[in-house]
Structures are given as structure tokens and as C-alpha cells.
Image: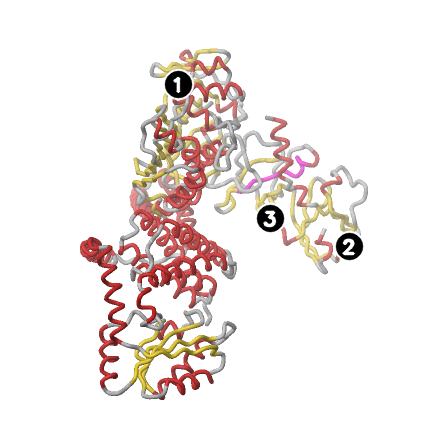
Amino acid sequence: METSQYLDIFIDESMEHLDMLYQQLLELEKNPKEKEIIEEIFRAAHTLKGMSATMEFDDLAGLTHKLENIFDGIRDDKIVVQTEMMDSLFHAVDHLNAMVEDISNGGNGKRDVEEIISQLDLIEKGESAIVTSKKEKKEDKVNSNTIDDLDEFQLTILGESKDRGFDNYEIEVHLREDCLLKGARVYMVFELLEKSGEVIHSNPTVNDLEEENFDFSFSIMFVTKEDPQELQAKIMKVSEVEQVNITPFSIEDYKEVQDKIQEQVTEVKPEKDNNRESKKADNNTKMQQTGKGAQSKTIRVNIERLDILMNLFEELVIDRGRLEQISSDLNHYELQETVERMSRVSSDLQNIILTMRMVPIDTVFNRFPRMIRQLARDLGKEVEIEVIGAETELDRTVIDEIGDPLVHLIRNAMDHGIETPSRRAELGKPEQGKIILEAYHSGNHVFVEISDDGSGINKEKVKNKAIEKGVISSSEAELLTDQQIFELILASGFSTNEEISDVSGRGVGLDVVKNTIESLGGSISIDAIPGEGSTFSIQLPLTLSIISVLLVELQNEKYAIPLSSIIETAILKKKDIFSAHHNKVIDFRGKVIPLTFLNKIFDVPHEEDEEDEYVSIVIVRKGNKVAGLVVDSFIGQQEVVLKSLGNYLTNVFAISGATILGDGEVALIIDSNALVK
Amino acid sequence: MSETGLLENKVIVYQLEEEEYALLVQHVGAIEKVLPITRVPNMPEFVKGVINLRGIVTPVIDLKERFYHKSTEFTEQTRIIIVSLEDITVGLIVDSANDVIDIQPDHIEPSPEAIGSVVVDYISGVIKLDERLLILLDLQKVLNKAEINDLKTMEG
């Protein structure tokens, strides 16, 4: 089958199902008896198996099949969920994930899964061990217990056939382990049997047998008048059949056994049925909800097409700027009116395109519970995670970048923040630590906060460390506010944990976080209460590609300053500028703010030193720090498309990119973060 | 360089001062008249700035500045040759660009010890054609990023 055209869809959907598996497994760990969760997992595994088998990814299909079997067992109360087996299950899903990733990277999804398969086999068999121990007594009465899931209807048929003089047999067929065409052999066996009687039931089901979803043996409930010896001989003639066991089947014994199992099950879990009922009701309402949700139709669109659309729209924004300029130059009424209307329509269009590219932050958040679980185990800590606002949407480009910084911060919180269970007990805190991951919108920004209820940040320790590492001088340290001290841990070459652990603490982590976030046009701040925990708050722009800027002029050159970093603009008299330590400062709203002369920083060629009585200042901020940028004049606010300077000019000081103005010229975008010290 | 291994090549011929240079046509994306250039601060002298090349912000380098430390004066003949090498796209300012010619691999000779005043390091060979001598630049070296980074740190 030519399947390559479906590959993208397959990968997308597999990822979704794997996410679902992870989430539900985590849920299951918390509520091991929740039927709904088990159903959910079973469904996800089943779909995944079907898809991967169709796409001919055999290892993937094999492993999911195992998972499916186990959850089938759990569903039928044959396997009891135990904490020990959760690890293997998570492991299995990790393997699946790796395979899907391999496939999405163009691989063939092959992976050595023998070890995990054997682990899963153990779980599956562990079940049969439990079950057999339950029916030990009947072992002598029922020769084989491979078939134990007959329904009422099948039992009636078996009963009737007995009355009419037919014999019921349970036939167990073992194929040779090197059998290549299992499906074909099964077919041959069935064909042969159907000539001399009737197959009532098979385990696994006929469908699974045809799809070769079984190991090497299967059982059949068979009604016939023939002699079992003859039957056995006939089946043995089918090639690659290794062994055939035929045993008479007695309905009475079977019923007895089943009743006993039933009794045991109901005895053990009388309340569970109630639970199940209520859950069923819940489930129904949920189904209705999703039913409604499905009515708002969606289509999958390749992200590349959205990128192309965005690029085209960016071109349009540039031309819009140009048109606006031309129409205002020409001062033609009708032209102006038309251009205005076009601008309005195109800003609506811009909103729609931007929202189309929005992705819920859940796509980043959802991998954290698993990571935290694993990490907690590695660190010997107990940590619970709470996610708030996972539905908050962000531009895909931001989403792509934000994952790693968040991972760093969470690791940091788990490693440095949250104490060991014993220490927490000493402090009178609950042994299980808690990490809260919260995302919310505010204005043109998205905030992501990571808070833990750990030890907080030790100010003195941070201060001493910073002085020791030469990040600040001791005199400087005295002047710092609490927040400024906390932010020192984001400085490069800083790590307070004495021993370097695998998890975090190489002293490179947090400054990378800071850099990444700032390169996204965002900012990060820290708050901490000793003994009660710390909060890292990240502010991010909604989108990266179109931003609002203030255009300013430096002599004849135009520069753009992102509005997101501007507090306000001011025009001051020259005499209001003071000198302090050879630095120019101003007293602005009762605060002393350092000034940066952009003309000097950017070495702008100037014709003559004209003595102007006034200076134009843009007040910008970075975190809590504020600075004034001195410019020659303000031009105005504008929406511009952020463009990179290309791969040749990288790391230009204080320039974060460029944009194309209405007149077709390029203006550079100032990275005010680099100018605030 | 591997280009010499190709059987037949076309080159774009351009001029810096009195000397004729050649660029393999496969590296050339476009030849533009001079567009408005936006200066990029704190860059080496030869990086003149960036231009808007049909919506793409493209850096431009003044080759004369680079080789002779002397700025190009823009005239009617001045051109910006847009060249691409791997993931880098850059515009080269030249005095004029007016010829496309076919060359045979045996026309290309390894660079002699020194030709004129151009630093030998930037040359991958010379092309001899009857009365003409074309200098084939080694783009890889001309577009070496480490160099602008070095210069920057020196200045900064």
C-alpha cells in the first residue's frame, strides 16, 4: 500500500494519541481503579495500533498491541493496576514516542523493544498468574482455561448442541515459532474445522487472528460430531502447526468457574460498581459536550502554508505602510478614504491570521507532568504539579522557543527549590512538594509563571556567591533590592548549589533561560519568600512577526524601538540633565534614570552640532530597571514586520532586527534590553 | 575549489577600479542598481549596511573598501551583485558589472603569488582570456563571518 501521503497525518495523530496515553497514564497512577481512564487508554492504544499496522510500522504496532492487551486485561479485571507496573507502562510509551519521532524524522520507526516487550509480557502473565491462583481449585476439572470469556449467547449454543448430540471441544492450536504466514495457517485450520463442525468462539477473536495479532497459539470453541482424535490428526496436517490439544468442554464446569471468579470480583470491589455507574453518567455528559464541540468544524492545515500566508501578509503590511504614506503625501480625499478602509480591513485580516497561528500553551505544558514525575523519582523527592491556564494561546513561533527555558526553570525549581521529603517533614510542610505552572493573557502579552513551595531563595547566599564569582562588587551588593538580588541567579556563571547535579546547577542553565526569553522580546522576573517558595514570572509577546514600534530619528537615520519595552516618552530641557560619575542622568518622576545617547552608541554621522534647547527621551525598561534613550526626534507609532538581518550579520550590538518602512527603506530595530544596564 | 572541476562555466564579469573580476554565475542571484542603503552601526567599514531586496533585508559589502580600504563612489555604473553561498546572502558593491562569458576549466589557473593589490588569500584563481585577465574571488573567504566578528570585537 502506498502510504507516504498519509505519513504527516499519521505522525500528527500518533503524537496526539501518545500525548493522550501519557496524560491518562498519569491519571491512572492517581486513580488506578478509574474505568473511564482505562477505557481511554485502551482506545488510544487500539487506534495507534491500527494506524501503525496500516502504515506498516511493525515495531510500533507490536508494542502498542502489547499495551492494548494489558489494558484489555485491566478493563476485564484480569490485571490489577499496581505501581510497579506503571514504570514499565511509561517506559513503553517512551519507546513509542521515540519510534514516532524517528518516523517523523524520516526514519522507519524500527527500535529494539524486546526488553520492554518482555516486561509487558510479564505484566500480562502476572495477570494470568493471579487469575489462575484464584481458580486453582478448578484446575483439575477444567483442563484448560484459555477460553474464559464466553457470552450468554455462545453458552446457549453450546448447551443446545449438547442436547442435539454434538460434542463441544476446546481446541488449542500451537503454531511453530518460526511460522511466517500465521494468518494463512489460521485460515487453513478454520477452513478445515468448518467442514466438520462449527466454530463457536475463538480466543483471540477471528479478526485478531486474521490480522496476526496473536503470539503462536490460539484456542477455538468447536462443536462437532467427529472424533477428537481424527480432528487432531487433521489439524496436525496443516503445515507449521506444532501441537494441537483437544479437550472436551463442559458448560457446567465453565459456569461454576466463572461464577466463582465473579463472586471474588464483586466481593473485592463492591463500591466500584457504584463508582462505575456515576462515571458512566459523567461520561455521557462528556460525550454530549464533545458532540457539541465537534460541530464547530476544523480542518488541518499544514503549518508551512500558514507561514507562507503570514509572509505574504507581511508583504502586504509593508505595502500598506507605503500606501498610507503616499496617500497622505498626495492629500487626495478619495484615495485617503480608500486607503483608510483598506488599512482597517487588513488589520482585521492580521488579527485573523495571527489567531490562526495561535497554539494553546498546553502543547508545551503537557510534557511537563511526565518530566516532573521522572525527575522527582531521580531526585528522591515527591512533587505534584498543577497546571493552570493550559488553554492560553500563543503564537507558534513563541511556543517553539519557550519549551527549553521552561524545562530549565522547572528543573531548577525541583532541584534547588523543593526540599527532600524528610526535610519538608522537619519543616512541617507536607512531604509532597508542589509546582504550579500558570499561563494567562494580559494585554498584548502572555505571562507564564512557575511557582514552587520549596525553600525560596537565600538572599545572603546569593549575594555572597555573586560577590565571590565577581558578578557584582560588595559595595554594589549593599544597594540591591530583594528582587535584584534574586535576579542575580540569572546572571551567567552563577550557580548556588554547591554540588553540581545532573539535573541543574552547571551554572549555565538560568542565564540561557534569560537570554532566550529576552531574545523573544520577553522578560523574566523572580520573587521568593524564604521557606515558602519562589515564583519565576515570564512575560512574552503574543507574536513575534508583527510588532508595534515607535519610530525615532537620529540625524537622518530612522530607528524603531519596540513599544513593549517603552514606558513613556518625554521632552526635557537640556539643563535638566545632570552629571553623576561622568554619566548623564535625569531626575524623572522622582527617580534618577541614566541616559544613553543613541547618536553616540550608534556612531551616527552628524553634520554639525546644533545646539538644541530640548532633548527627546524614550524611557525604556528591562525588568525593573529603567533607562532613558536620547534621540533627535520622534516620528510616530507604527506596526511593522520584524525581519532578521540575515545570516551574515549576526550579533549586531543593540540591534535585534530590521523592518521595511512605508518608503521601502530599511529601519533597524533597537534592542533596548542591551542598552539598559 | 570544486568549481574548477566543472566542465563548462559561465562567469559574471565586474570591475573594481581598473581590474576585472569574475564570479561564477551559480553564486549570483541578481544584479541590482544601487538601492538605498541603511547603515548598520558598529560594523567594519566594508559592511555598508542593509538594503531592502524585494522584502528581504540583505547586507551589502563594499568590495573596494574591503580590498583597498577605499570607499566606492556611487555612479550610474555602480551595481550591487547579490551573491549566495550556503545560507548567506550578501550584496557586493562593484564599480560596474557588464559581461557574462563562458569559460573552459583550462582557462582557470591557480592564483599567482600576487596580483595587483588584492590580497592573495581571497583569490581562488585567475582566468586568462586572450587579452583579458579575470580574477576569480574565493567567496567562501570573502564572506567569512569570523572576520567581521573579529573586527567588531576589536572595535568594541
- Horizontally, residue A11 falls left or right of residue B34, namely left
Residue linked to disc 1: A481
- Alpha carbon of mark 1 to alpha carbon of mark 3: how far? 50 Å
| Chain letter belonging to callout 3 | B
* Image vertical order of residue A624 relative to residue A413, above or below: above
Picture quadrant where residue A139 is located: bottom left
Separation of disc 3 and disc 2 at Cα? 24 Å
Q: Secondary structure at mark 3?
A: strand
Does the magenta-highlighted stretch encompass residue A593? no
Residue visible at 74% across and 38% down in the picture: B119
Give amino acid for label 2: His
Query: Which label belongs to residue B107?
Result: 2
Specify few, some or many for label 2: CA neighbours under 10 Å numbering under 14, 14-19, or 20 or more: few
Residue that badge 3 annotates: B84
Asked where in the image residue A380 lies, by quadrant, the reply is top left
Which element is circle 2 on?
A: helix
Of circles 1 and 2, the one toward us is 1
Residue A615 percent coordinates (x, y): 42, 19
* Amino acid at circle 3: Ser
Question: Could you tell me which chain the residue with mark 2 belongs to?
Answer: B
| Residue A626 percent coordinates (x, y) | 40, 22
The span from disc 1 to disc 2 (Cα, nearest Å) is 71 Å
Labelled pair 1, 2 in contact (Cβ < 8 Å): no
Magenta part of the chain? B58-66
Disc 3: CA contacts within 10 A as few (<14), some (14-19) or many (>=20): some
Within-10-Å neighbours for mark 1: few <14, some 14–19, many 20+: few
Q: What's the amino acid at mark 1? A: Thr
Q: Does label 3 or label 2 sit earlier along the sequence?
A: 3
Point 43% across, 76% down: residue: A183
